[in-house]
Every structure is written in structure tokens, then in C-alpha cells.
Amino acid sequence: MTGRLRRDPRAERAARQVGLGARPRFDLAQPPGGRSPGGGVSGIGPSGRIRRDPRAEQARLLVPGGDRPRLVRGGTGGTGTARVSAPAPAQVIRVDDPACLVVAIPDLPDGRLDRLDRQVLGAARVLADAASGAVVMLGGAAHPDLVQEAAQAGADRLAMVDTALPGQAVLDPEYRAAVVCAALAALSPRHVLFPDSDDGADLARRVAAHTGQGLMTGVEVLTARQAIRPCRAGRREQISAPPALMTLAPDRVAPYAGAVREARLLPGGVDPVPVLPVPGRIRASAPRAADPATMKLAEAPFVVAAGNGVTDFGLFRAVVADLHATPGASRVVCDAGLMPRAAQVGASGTVLDAVCYLAFGIAGAPQHLQGLGRVEHVVAVNTDLHAAMVARAGLSVIADAQRVMPAIRDALAAEGG
Amino acid sequence: MGLVLVCLAWGLAAGVLLAARGLARRWRQGRPVRVDWVAGLAAVPRRYLVDVHHVVERRPEAARMHVPTAGGLLAGSVALMLAVLPALRGSRVYWAVVAVLFAAALWGAILVRRRRRPVVPSFLSAGMFLWLPAALGAYAGGALLLALGMLAVPGGGASPLLLAPLLLAVGGAGGLLVQFARGPMRHAFAGTVWLAAHARPGRFGGGRDTALRPLDLDAPRLGALAPSDFAWTALASFDACIQCGRCEQACPAFAAGQRLNPKALIQDLVAATRGGSAAEPYSGSPAPNAPPVACRGSMDAPVIGVDAMIHPDTLWACTTCRACVEECPMMIEHVDAIVDLRRGQALMLGQVRPGAAQALRRMRDSAEPGGRPLAARADGLAALDVPVLPEGGETDILLWLGEGAFDLRYGRTLQALVRLMRLAGLRFAILGEAETDCGDLARRLGDEATFHLLAGEAIATLKARTFQRIVTADPHALHVLRNEYPALGGHWTVQHHTALLDELVTGGALRLAPRDLPPVAYHDPCYLGRYNGEIAAPRRLLDAACGTRVEMERHGMRSMCCGGGGGNPISDVDGAARIPDLRMAQADAAGAAIVAVGCPGCTAMLEGVPAPRPEVRDIAELVLDAVVTA
Amino acid sequence: MATELRAVVLLSAGIDPVSGRPAPVGTEIRAIGLARALGARMIGLHAGPAAPVLREYAGYGLADIVCLDGAGHDPVAALARAIVSGSLFTDGTVDLVLAGRRASGGMDSGLLPYAVAERLGWPIVADVAEGQVAVPASRPPEFDVEQARPRGTRRAARVAAPCALAVHDVASCVPDFVFARTRMAVLRTMPSGLAEPSAPVTETVEERAYRRRPRLIASTATQAPGGQVLVDPPPQDAARAIIDHLRALGVLPPPAGS
């Protein structure tokens, strides 16, 4: 038996037949192995490659409501394997005798696969499928309930190695790297993929430096034949065959959206446990969340800002605190000394990198809007329907900010009590 | 008795000379500069009687005070000194003349007193000024009485009756000497020296000289950190300040409470040269809201800093609008002083405000203060397909877009301008990606090194292309290209877009039909008006394009800044109000529904004023709306 | 502190991402700032020929810069060799290697500080947002550093000298740029001491101009302008709509009761 999928054209045809008419009718959009649990947006084509159905994908991105079709790309409702609850998978894809292994090492923040982790597994899937290989997810020993999630994200195997220092609260990135190196040595994979997050990139570079293998960081395009990454300050790009070690830039490769994988557990642990020549050289604690009230505006995920339409700044600060947000302000407000200069949002103040920006009484001068360069979601509360901020906002409330702010406080207080 | 009076006059003169020597000794600790003394001294009477008087007479009551006081005192004292000639001493006509002169001086002293009574206006200083009228009055009054006595008793005589006036005159003269050596009266000597050795002689006789002087970047000390780093003539100019407070009243940063008072700045510099707090304390209004400083200083000690004389915020509040310079009767160059100090802070210490530091770094790294790609500058004109002048290319008019072109709002102005130029059939092109920042912002912030870097690149770019003239809608770029590049080897004819449009309308290439618009007020950009004297062409255009035009109280050469110049917006100096808000309120008060502008800085600043406010339109937009197409 | 720290700052001849002009790299400027914050004496180390842009680092306070000649084919070996050679500081060995977390202008892989640390056998902590010498002072000195993590979170770490620190872009320790200092910069060239490679190094990686490609996430630039608009709603309805919207975006935690 080879590692290649064996196809049964008859069974595939039967699975695609719809209804029981006089003439047989077939739904060719349906994957040959039956509907995937996520509602089925793709299947395995005759060549064994993932087939995409752009229409179905688009339909799944459609946001209900509104007269204009609006699509939400990315996000949990995006191209990720659907979280939609579905009946137990009809069929699990197994790869019993892989030609090679592709290892994905997710970050697992909070013990779950995050967005980028799923994309890393998706990328590993691309490489493995082209070479009739298997995807091994490495890590997650502390989270045994990950199996189901990993299977949906495309892992054929699970190597649940424990990268935490035994019996210690502090984290040692050197120990983690040593464990990963040992595990990789045992698996001898063809490719290893890391997320290009802070932790993932750190681990990848440690592994690369330790093993002396080449590392391609921040890969933006990944196919079976080539990997592309920016270089020279992002003005040029490198193209090469996928190397042994790679970190994957966020939101570049779609997560796996096919049928559930086996996620077979490999014998756990690394044996023997690696011993560092000098243990404990780096003692790191767990990350601690920043206090939104005092964190740097440029890094804050959620900023609530006041403009000319706000007159009661005590109330404004209270609303910001209730919303667990970081306070910001327009130039007018800072010039008047009503908010500190460090809170100024705009071209001459801070340029935000927030997920969401809630603007109370800010019309949105061009200089100010330049400060919102990378903000994904804007909410505007303004009396002027034609304000530039309203045009930029995903949700606009045409009302007096001074009246909306207490209502928000009341609503939040009512929930809490 | 006559001889006693003569002695008094000569004694006063000797004392004045002695005090003047002390002043001169202090100034000589400044940086040496070459002065053409012959031409300078020869020009003093004309500079004083024409140029200084032109400024003083904007406030007639000040002129009415100054003429009898200065004229009476000076002429009377010189006349008394002439009494060494025995023939004069015996002449009744002579004594009558002396009496008239001192009567005038006494009247002047009374007027001087009236300026500060019953209350000292906020823009005037108190301190030694409070007893200056007494000293003036005592000297003039005493001398007057003595002259009358000489008139009454020919030949003189030691009448005991004349003893009291004599004592009065002696006391007054002593007071005046103190006022001269340590107080405001030194302005008479310092002002004369400064008028003779002025750093910008081109300003006299109705001329203009507003370009900053290039700095030798290889000099051991760049800019001014201590008073001794200033040119000695600048030190003299600081002593020439009579604290009349006109600069303070004109300063937009002062009006907004932004920690700058030009008068206090000059007086703080004077105090630094005299040893900080040991000097005569400053008694005018301070830099508003400025945190307290240690008031320590000396000729060679740093002058900027909380442990020195001047708070750093004061420097960065200046918009370099030159309103203070325009109003100063002593022709002091405040902006030069501020830029010298900024140069010291920026080049020697790297002490600029965070926003400015970021902009300067971007200018060094990517030749653009906003860090935007140079190719994006012409994005606003993409739909109009304006040709780009390649290296070695040739055209009639080169359109310099400037920094404002990155802004969508100002892109509309440029679109209007391009449409008008097309309608007039002009042949023009832009530089496209080859246009780098002209360096205005870097230079005003005192970063002369970055300015030289940017200017060198821009000059090389321009020299590689052939054109008749440069047209720009940005007065800041206009000023740099027209007035400051020549010193670096770039000579071109540079025109503001309002001048070009005026030329086209006057010449008939564009026909305008005035539209029925609500009242329009024109806001003069500082760098077009005060820096380049162009105030007529924009008004002619508006008269041709709009129905009714109103004037704000401050307009033309005495217009008020929008707050956008000199790096003020990126320096973020805290204040009590915002300069553009104040300016918009003035437009409102003038009854304007539309404020016409001609500068991307003014557009951005005035459009940033919260509604309700008059609409902001560039002149090019208003002209395009009014143009009649055949 | 009994003895002063001796730090080496790894410098690259960077280019500006926007303009492509030679420019100092932001994280390396911050590395200089961190060295100053730690009170270290520092020498800049550049694997390659002296480039004019290196002078700009002097403006940020790094007056003494050593360029390693002939290091182009193996910068890691050249840098490590120079650091342990003892020839950089006259009075002792190097305590600390500082670098930006990622250069800007070359391969930009961020691997070099790790490779140098590995070669030296020193620990490396990356993404440093701020750092200080740990109290109580010890010998060898220890450093308390804060690592930047996404969304403003921080992770504390302690590491002892000798070590390498790679500085993150969010570090606020940006030193002032002083033009007068650039005039006094000393760029020394030292031989790297590496043998010339026997065969010329062949560049196997293909390079071309960067192409911008759409990300999976919809960027704000392509998002259809305007969304849901509520005109003059009662304040209670407005508050409810805003709160629900924020919850849907995941920026506001769900109510405590649920």
C-alpha cells in the first residue's frame, strides 16, 4: 500500500448523486468524500489537491442583513474550518504511510489553536499533500483536548511534547528550543513551519541557529513548489523552493478547510529529556496583560477617543474605564489641555494599530484620520451625519456623545448588577 | 550758573559714554561679525527717521510721546553742551531756545508718565519704567527752570533761587544715567548701534530681507546655546528693546497662551547676558503658562532649560510668522534669534520636541516629513494626467506641489490650479517622484544639517531640468525656493499660484465673472505676505471672482498667523487656546462666510477648526468656480 | 556599579522601507538607546565595509564604530570572532551584545543575533521593549528585561551577562539625534580575520521587486466605506447597539453574568 489516496470513481459518483429522478443528477460541488463537517467549501480533486469553490466561500463570508452584500474576510467566520456545529464527521482522512513529514509548531496561546496557528497547519497541509506526506503538529502536551481541534485544522499526527520546564513556573525559551530540536531530530521532517508571531519567530530562530539549518522567515506565499518572502526592507522579495525551516506571516495562507484528519497521537514526549549545558540562563515569566488605561496608545487594541463633541471629561474617562479601553483624543482636545498630549490620535500624534476605534464627537479631520491607518473597525458617535468619521465607520450613531456616554455606562452597570 | 549747567550737560554726556562703553564691552563677547560702519552710520538718520518712524507712527500716541521726549532731551542737552562757548552763554536767544527744547522734553516726560498711569497696560513693563518719567521730568524741568532763570537774569549769577532747580536737574541727570546704564534708556545707544550695524540692511527703505542665513556646518559651535554664541550685533539688538510690547500683542503663540512672549524672550536673553537673576528683574508679562525656570544665566552659560533662563517650550511655540519683527519699532530680528537658539538645541543637543524629532528623522531617511512615498505626492492629480518632467526635460512652467499635495483636501486646490492652467493654455509639468521636500520645516526647526541635505537634493533635481519659472501653491516652498536657495546656488524665478492666476486674469487669458457669494475674507499666509510682500494679487483675484470681500482687522502685512508655520503644529506646545481657532473667530467677527486661503498649511489649520465656522476655500478653487469658458 | 558594562551594538547599513534610501534601522537605534539606559559603554560593530549611513548611528550616540573588512561571506563568524577577540575594548571583555530584532535592508530574517549568540554560546532574549540592570547588583551583572508581546502585553525575563539582547520596535528608548555627534564619528576598519572562501559564494536565492498581495483579512482600504448608521436613536438604543457591536468584534468582554 502506498501513501497515495486511492480513488473509487463509482463511489464518488454515487456520493454526489442528488435525488432519485429518472435521470441521475449529480452535485459536482460536493466533495467526493461527502460533505465536510464545516459545510463543505472544498474537496479533494482528482489530483489529490484541494479544490476550492470560490462561490461557496464567498457565500459563507456573506454577513446577514443590510441591502448591500458585505463580506467579512478573515476572522473566525472566514475561510477557517468552520466552527459551525455539525454532526460527527462522516469520514476521517488517514495517511497511514506518509512519504515524508511536515511539522507545524503552533503557538497555542491559551491552549488553543489561534488564527495564525490554523494557517500554519493549513500551510503544512499544502506541503504535505503535494508530497503525499503527513502533517505533524508538535506541542500541546499540556492541552490533551486539542486533538479534535488539531484534527479539524489538518493534523495527521500529534506529537504532544512538553516544552515547559519540568516542575517550574518560569519559562525557559532555550529549554523549549532544545526540546523542539530533539523532537525534530527524532521525526526528521522535510519541512518545519512556525507562525511568524513573537513567540513562534523566537523559537524558529533558536532552532535554526542551533541546528544550522536555513530559515526563511515571514513567508508570504507558499505553494508546494515555492516560498516567497519579503527582504531588503520589504522592497524586494526572495523566491526559493520551500526550505526546511519557515515562519509563516499572518493571513497569507488559508487554513485547512477540508475533511477532518486523523490527528493520531505519536508516542508522547522526547526521550531522553534534553539537558541544557547551562540551564536556567533565561528565566521568563508568563506574559501579563497590559492595563488598558495606561498602555501605550500605539499598541492598544481598543481605543476610545474624545473630540470636540465631548464636554464632560470625567464622564468620558469613566466610560473608557467601563469599556476596558485605552483613552485617546483629537488634536483639538489635547490642544485645549483637556487630555494629555500622549493621548493625541492623528498624523501629528499617535498612529494606532488597534482592532477597534470608538470616536465620541470627532468629526474626522484628514490629519486625524491618518492616525487610524491600520484600524480595522471604527465606531463613530457624532451629531453630524456627513462627518468624515461617519463615512469611515462600520457603525455610526448620529447623536450627541454627551447623551450616549451615560447610556453606555448605565447599560454596562445594569449588566454587571 | 551757566557754567554749572554746561558742566552738568558735559557730565551727563561723559556718564553716557562711560555706560555705553560698558554695553559695548558686553556685546563684544558675542560672535564677531563684519560691519560696514561708514555706510551703516551714514544710513542711521534715514533708517531712524523713515523706517523706525514708519513703525512707531502706527500708534500715533507713541509717536507724539517719543518726538518731544527724545528730540527735546537730545537737542536740549546738546545745546547745553554748546554753552561752553562764552558767546552763547550771554545770548538771551540761546537760552530761549534751550528753554523751549527742555519744555518740549518736559511735555514728553509727562506723556511718558501717562502711558503707565493710572494702570500699567498688560503689554507694557513696570520696574524701572515707573520712575523713568520722574527722572526725565526732573532733568528736563530743572534745566528748563535754569534756562528761564538765565533768561530772566542775563549774565547769570549765583542766585540761591536757582539752587533748587539745579539740584533737581542734577538729580534727574543722575537718574537718567542709571536708566542708561542699567535700565531701558540704553535703548537709545543700543538702538543706534543696531540700526547702523543691522543684520538685515535690506529691510530698510521699503525693502525686504527675510531669508534665514546659511550656517557653516563645520563650525565648532552650531547655533546659539549661550548668549555669547549670538552675533554681537544681535546682543546689541536685544539691548535696543524698549519693551513696548507690540511684539507680544502681535504674537499668535502668545495670544494662544503657548508659552512664548517675544518681549519676555528678548528680555530673558538680555538678563542672561547680565548674569541672570542678578540683573534688573523683568517686570512685563511673562511667557504665558510657561513653567518656572531657575533664572540663572551668564554670557557663556546655556540659556535654554529649566535650570537656565528660558523654558524649552518657549522656543518651539514660535510659528516664525514674523509678526513680532513686523511690529518691532527697533527692527529687532526675533525670528533670527529663535532660529539661532533652535539650531543650537537641534544640532548640538538633539533637543527637539518628539513630533519634530520624528519628522526630522523621516526627512533624513526618506526626504519627506510624513514618511510617505514620494510617488504618492501626485496621487491627487492622477485623474488630470499632468506630465512629469524627466531629467533633462524642458517645459515652460514647473509646478512644485509641496508637502500639502499629500493631503486629499489640498489635492482639490491643486486640481483647481491645474484646470485653470490648462484653460489658459499653459505648458507645464510636475516633478513627480523626483520632487523631494524643499526643507522648509527642517530649517525652521533649526536642523540646518537636514535642510542642507534636502536643499542640495532639490537644487540638483531642479538644475537637471529646463523651465522658465517655478509656480507653487505653497508659500513656504515659495519662500525657500525663491529666497533661500540662491545662497546655496539655486537661482530660479519662483511664483505663487495667486500671482500666476492674477497675471492670467489681468492678461485676459482667463475671464472671470464675479459670483454671488456670501462675504469672503482673505487670510494672508505669513510666508506670502510678510515674507514676500505679496498681498495685492490675491485680493485682485478675489475681487474679480467673488461678490463681496471683507477684510479682517489683521490683514496684509500685519495679518495673523494660522498657527501652521515654523514646526509649531508638530511641536505640540500646550496652550490655553488654539491659534487657528483665534484666527477663525477673527474671520467670523469680520462677517466672513468664506475664508479664502492660499497655503496648504493655512488650509489644514483653518479646516481643523471645529464647526460652526466659515468655509475654507483656496483662491484657486474660487477662481475656477468663477471662470467663464468661451 | 563597580565596573562599567561593555556593550557591542550590531549595526547594519539599512535602507528606509518607504524610500529605499540608505537609513539607520529603527531597532538598532533603539538598541543604542537601551545600551545608554543600561549605562553601558558601547562600540558599534558592522560586518562589512564602512558605509556613509553608519555615521548616522553616531548621531544617536554611538561614536565609535568598527567595520569588519572581508566579513561579507560569513558575518556571523566575523562578528563572533571580533566580540571574543578582546580587541574591541582595551580594558576587558564584552558583557553584552545588542541588536535590533530584525535588520532592514538585507535578508531581514532576524536570524543573525541568534546565530551570533549561538556561536558565542551566550543566551539571547529577543523583542526587548525595555531593560535595566537587576538589583541587587551582582557579578556577572544580570538584566531584567521586558519582552514585547502582541496587543501591548509584556513578558518579564531575567538573563545574566554575557548575553545578547535583540530590541523590539516598540521600545521607547529612542535616543536623540545630534548632528554635531555625527561630525565626530570614528569609523574604524578592522580585518575580519576570516579566510577568503575557497570558491566564490554563489547566490542561490532568486530575488525580484516586491509584489504586494492581498491578505486574507480585508484591509481597511478595501472595506466598503460606510456601514450601519443609526440616526437620532434614543440614547439607550444607541448604547445597546454600540455595546453589541463591540462584543461582536471581541474587543469588549461579555457581561460578567454570562
Image (cartoon, rainbow, N blue to C red):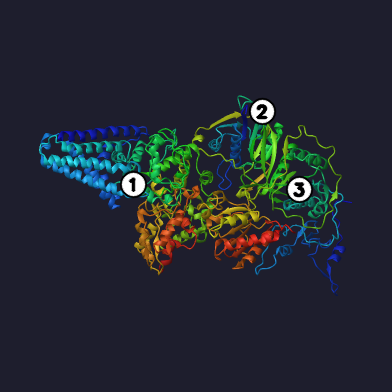
Q: Is residue A167 left or right of residue A405?
A: right
Q: Is residue A26 left or right of residue B189?
A: right
The span from disc 1 to disc 3 (Cα, nearest Å) is 73 Å
- State which quadrant residue A416 falls in: bottom right
Asked whether residue B227 is in view, the answer is no
Q: Amino acid at mark 3?
A: Pro
The span from disc 2 to disc 3 (Cα, nearest Å) is 36 Å
| Vertical placement of residue B163 versus A256, above or below | above
Q: Nearer the viewer, residue A248 or B116?
A: B116
Q: Which subunit holds the residue at mark 3?
A: A
Q: Nearer the viewer, residue A69 or A309?
A: A309
Q: Nearer the viewer, residue A132 or B265?
A: B265
Quadrant placement of the N terminus of chain B: top left
Q: Which subunit holds the residue at mark 2?
A: C
- State which quadrant residue C13 falls in: top right
Residue on which disc 1 sits: B244
The span from disc 2 to disc 1 (Cα, nearest Å) is 68 Å
Question: How many residues crowd mark 2 within 10 Å: few (<14), some (14–19), many (20+)?
Answer: few
Question: How many residues crowd mark 1 within 10 Å: few (<14), some (14–19), many (20+)?
Answer: some
Q: Amino acid at mark 2?
A: Val
Q: Amino acid at mark 1?
A: Cys
As helix, strand or loop, the secondary structure at mark 3 comes to loop
Asked whether residue B155 is in view, the answer is yes
* The residue positioned farthest toward the right in the image shown: A1
Mark 1 vs mark 3: give the one in front. 1
Residue A106 marker: 3
Residue on which disc 2 sits: C84
Q: Nearer the viewer, residue B160 or A412?
A: B160
| Vertical placement of residue A233 versus B619, above or below | above
